[in-house]
Amino acid sequence: MTEQESRLNLGDFRTALKRAALFTSSGGSGRPVLESVRIKFSGDSIRFDAADGYKLAVQRMDATRIVGAGDAAAMLTNSDVATLLKALPKTVASDTDEIAITIGEFAGADPITIVHRWNDDEREREQRWDFIAYPGTFPDIARVIPREQDTHGAQHIAIDAKHANAVNKAALVTRGAAGTVRWYFGDGDKSPAVALVGDSFVAVVMPLFVDWPNVSAD
């Protein structure tokens, strides 16, 4: 694989890493590939994939291809992701800074370079990280995610994240079967969702009426 480079803004990059990190295995899975975030170039976007054997996340961020035209992918381990999140600035003002991601090939390994660029007193500055990507094979997510979901296809319901999070928090303070939530959805996308935790907690969450975007693993 020849060297390929794409660029995006820091705000999108930081958001993508934080989200993906929530879906990786925290360790001891016996499958290091599940303890990594896969970064994949695809056209005018960069995809960030993560899975832990029970859940899977796929997200796209707009990007500009600088070098190369085909697909390229490399996996960052959890420790590498943590290093980046700790080192990158977290201010809103830095969100528009540039992140350049380069994926190449060297001695059979896939090096991945992350460069953060910003202007300081009218001078361009940068900090750089070089990693060796994990060489395993990421799960075939195309077999898990439906190729298309829209208002003419599968049943769906939209729930405000803050309300879903309230249910999750309630489950985590329950003894016994803590963390287990049973969700029930009514007929159509206008019916409320009902969440049960154990046999003593019930929550009813009203849906949002929004367009459902297409979802694809490509």
Image (tube, grey):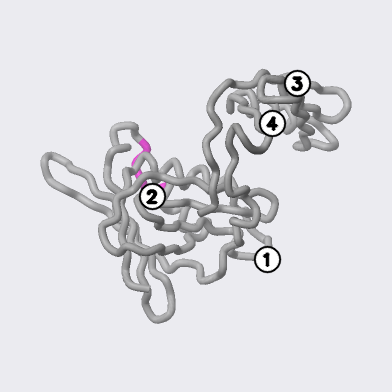
Q: Quadrant of the N terminus?
A: bottom left
Residue lying at the far left of the rendered structure: 122
Q: Disc 1 to disc 2, how far (Cα)?
A: 31 Å
Q: Disc 4 to disc 3, how far (Cα)?
A: 11 Å
25 relative position to 120: left or right: right
x then y, percent, for residue 72: 41, 64
Point 54% across, 48% down: residue: 216
Disc 1 + disc 2, Cβ < 8 Å: no
Residue lying at the far right of the rendered structure: 199
The residue closer to the viewer here, 86 or 155, is 155
Point 32% across, 62% down: residue: 69
Q: Disc 1 to disc 3, how far (Cα)?
A: 36 Å
N-term mark: 1 or 2 = 1
Q: Is residue 87 magenta?
A: yes
Point 76% across, 25% down: residue: 186
Q: Which of pointers 1 and 2 indicates the residue nearer the eye?
A: 2
x then y, percent, for residue 199: 88, 27
x then y, percent, for residue 167: 70, 27
Q: Amino acid at mark 3?
A: Ala
Q: Disc 2 to disc 4, how far (Cα)?
A: 31 Å
N-term mark: 1 or 3 = 1
Q: Which of pointers 2 and 4 indicates the residue nearer the eye?
A: 2
Q: Which of pointers 3 and 2 indicates the residue nearer the eye?
A: 2
N-term mark: 2 or 4 = 2
Q: Which residue is mark 3?
A: 203
Q: Secondary structure at mark 1?
A: loop
N-term mark: 3 or 2 = 2
The residue closer to the viewer here, 53 or 175, is 53
Q: Which residue is mark 1?
A: 30
Q: Which residue is mark 4?
A: 168
Q: Which of pointers 4 and 3 indicates the residue nearer the eye?
A: 3
